[in-house]
Image (cartoon, rainbow, N blue to C red):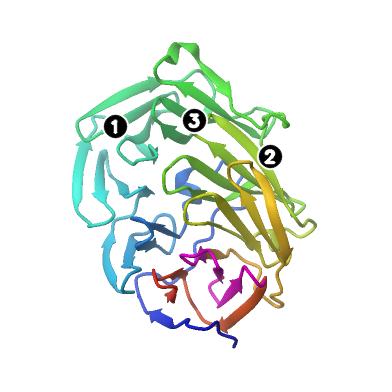
């Protein structure tokens, strides 16, 4: 095992999580927050890490400053520092930094929680196939939808992003302005693409400020791309990743956003590549080879060090650390870890 100077391993044995989240890669459905929620995420300025065994499981919170476990939240959706949980027809809000329940709203209908606004303050639930409820702890707004097969994608300000499934296959991201709902929806797409999305969504990552949503899509031939949705400008862009020909290899792509949110890193051990994407220009800024022979090609989680100098990967069976300056694997060890992160001082944390 190779180590970088000054790196110390802290092993956290947290029994609440024992399985690596495997998003629904084989599903033809769009990547809603419920189906593609990450199994690990950092928040509170990078001082806390949350993780779970699957999208429907409770969320364990650990302190990245000390490496100590803190508390467990009920199953739900995490947006910013807020976790939104459904209990029957009641929606509950929790502060993910303290574990405290901050509000609730019991709705008078049977509902299906599908998401929340990017700041977590408003929950989104389907009341019926053509009716959405947007709820706060103190009130609710109903939104009628045009005929069609709809799903939820995102909510930011007055902008409600919806998924519309097409009769001929595939789906579109469509925008409804809640300030002018009578104007209907419009397609949000890459200017160089048709607007119809094919393939299977595999994972999703949101920027800490809620502005960007990054969704990893995998095609049946093993090709992969990242769909970047800029909620501030209402623009989308598709960014192709290297490699094709092996669907299983494509499932090893893992995403991590650098502190500051300007660079999105994608590491694919199956295809042996690391790619850095400039979030603002939506272009590949650099790409290099990743040498991880015999790495299990399955869903992989990733975390960046506070200085963005190192990228840690975990696939449920082993952990690897890539030095992004030397472009080399500097540490690799067999370990049944569920999640991985870094302390504020650069210490590697493995959680299981």
Mark 2 or 3, closer to the camera:
3
Judged from the image, the secondary structure of the residue bearing numbered disc 1 is: strand
Instruction: Where is residue 70? Give x, y as percent.
Output: 26, 68
Residue at position x 33%, y 64% in the image: 60
Instruction: Where is residue 93? Give x, y as percent.
Output: 25, 45
Q: Which residue position holds label 2?
A: 198
Is residue 324 shown above or below 318?
Answer: above
Judge left or right: residue 21 versus residue 66.
Answer: right
Judged from the image, the secondary structure of the residue bearing numbered disc 3 is: strand
Residue 161's disc is 3
First in sequence, mark 3 or 1: give its number. 1
Work out how far the residue at label 2 is from the one at label 1, CA to CA, in angstroms: 31 Å
First in sequence, mark 2 or 1: give its number. 1
The extreme top residue here reads 182
276 or 132: nearer the viewer: 276
Tell me the quarter of the image containing the C terminus.
bottom left
Q: Which residue position holds label 1?
A: 135
> Residues in magenta?
303-326
Is residue 195 shown above or below 65?
Answer: above
294 or 147: nearer the viewer: 294
Is residue 28 inside the magenta stretch? Answer: no
């Amino acid at each position: 095992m190779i180590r970088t100077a000054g790196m110390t391993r802290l092993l956290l044995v947290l029994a609440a999580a024992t399985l690596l989240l495997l998003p629904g890669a084989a599903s033809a459905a769009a990547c809603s927050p419920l189906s593609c929620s990450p199994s690990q995420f950092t928040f509170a300025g990078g001082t806390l890490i949350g993780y779970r065994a699957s999208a429907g499981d409770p969320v364990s919170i650990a302190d990245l400053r000390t490496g100590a476990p803190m508390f467990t939240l009920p199953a739900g959706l995490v947006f910013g520092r807020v976790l939104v949980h459904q209990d029957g027809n009641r929606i509950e809000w929790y502060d993910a930094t303290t574990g405290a329940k901050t509000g609730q709203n019991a709705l008078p209908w049977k509902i299906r929680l599908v998401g929340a606004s990017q700041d977590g303050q408003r929950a989104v639930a389907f009341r019926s196939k053509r009716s959405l409820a947007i709820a706060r702890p103190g009130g609710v707004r109903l939104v009628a939808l045009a005929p069609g097969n709809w799903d939820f994608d995102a909510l930011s300000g007055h902008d409600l992003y919806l998924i519309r499934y097409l009769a001929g296959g595939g789906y579109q991201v469509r925008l409804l302005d809640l300030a002018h709902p009578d104007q209907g929806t419009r397609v949000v797409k890459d200017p160089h693409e048709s607007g119809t999305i094919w393939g299977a969504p595999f994972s999703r990552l949101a920027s800490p400020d809620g502005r960007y949503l990054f969704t990893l899509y995998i095609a049946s031939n093993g090709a992969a791309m990242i769909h970047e949705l800029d909620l501030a400008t209402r623009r989308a862009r598709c960014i192709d990743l290297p490699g094709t020909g092996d669907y299983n290899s494509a499932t090893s792509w893992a995403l991590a956003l650098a502190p500051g949110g300007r660079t999105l890193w994608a590491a694919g051990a199956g295809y042996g590549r690391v790619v850095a994407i400039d979030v603002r220009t939506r272009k590949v800024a650099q790409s290099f080879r990743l040498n991880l022979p015999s790495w299990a090609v399955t869903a992989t989680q990733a975390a960046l060090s506070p200085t963005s100098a190192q990228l840690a990967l975990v696939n449920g069976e082993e952990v690897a650390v890539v030095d992004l300056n030397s472009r080399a694997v500097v540490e690799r060890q067999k370990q049944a870890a569920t999640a991985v992160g870094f302390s504020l001082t650069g210490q590697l944390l493995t959680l299981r």
